[in-house]
Image: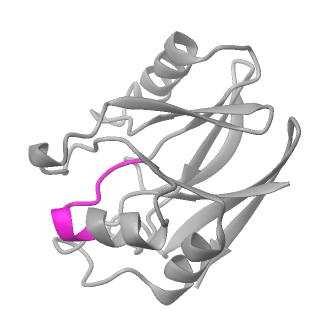
Amino acid sequence: MHRVALVSDTHVPSRASEIPDFVEEAVEDADAVVHAGDFDSEDAYDAFEELADGELVAVRGNMDPVNLGLPAVETLWVEDRQFVVVHGSGPLEGYEDRVLQAVREDRDGEDAIGVSGHTHDLADKTVEGVRLLNPGSATGASPADEATMLTVDVDGSDVDVTVVGE
């Protein structure tokens, strides 16, 4: 079994001053870390890269500096399960459609899981047969009501998703 930490929308320093302790602990304990964009600064990116100990998969959010050179979409295999990661940038209207399109374009099989951010809304739902995970905002950055992230335990192709918060 492998544990994946899913985080997004940290917005350090524009909307939050630091990464919460519970996020740092969960990231350090994970086998792999996925950040679905909006680090907001090179310093925040570097902090996650260090916490993840080289096991960071990250995509570009609409608030990320261009010099980070992050891709718009990234994929990750954990055991027998593929994750397709995209920020979901753009207006809230059409958000799910954009995320679904990215997952369908980049997945290798029907059971790939989509991971996105952007809305700051915690979500674990299935849309048109595709499971979509959004860890919310790891710092509780506005418009989120609280700081949240997800951990995913992967055993073969089985996944168990847990909400982690302060």
Position of residue 114 measured from the top left corner of the image (x, y, whole percent): 59, 33
Position of 31 relative to 19 (above/below) = above
Position of 161 relative to 157 (above/below) = below
Question: The N terminus is located in which quarter?
Answer: bottom right
Question: The C terminus is located in which quarter?
Answer: bottom right
Residue found 86% across the figure and 35% down from its top: 157
Residue 41, visible in the rendered structure: no
64 horizontally vs 123: left or right: left
Q: Between 150 and 144, which is closer to the camera in this rendering?
A: 150
Quadrant hosting residue 48 = bottom left
Residue found 45% across the figure and 73% down from its top: 51
Q: Main secondary structure of the magenta part?
A: loop
Taking the magenta stretch, the answer to whether it contains residue 4 is: no
| Bounds of the magenta segment | 36-44
Position of 61 relative to 77 (above/below) = below
Q: Between 55 and 97, which is closer to the camera in this rendering?
A: 55
Position of residue 140 measured from the top left corner of the image (x, y, whole percent): 41, 73
Tally of marks? 0
121 horizontally vs 48: left or right: right
Residue found 56% across the figure and 70% down from its top: 27
Residue found 60% across the figure and 17% down from its top: 107
Position of residue 94 measured from the top left corner of the image (x, y, whole percent): 40, 24
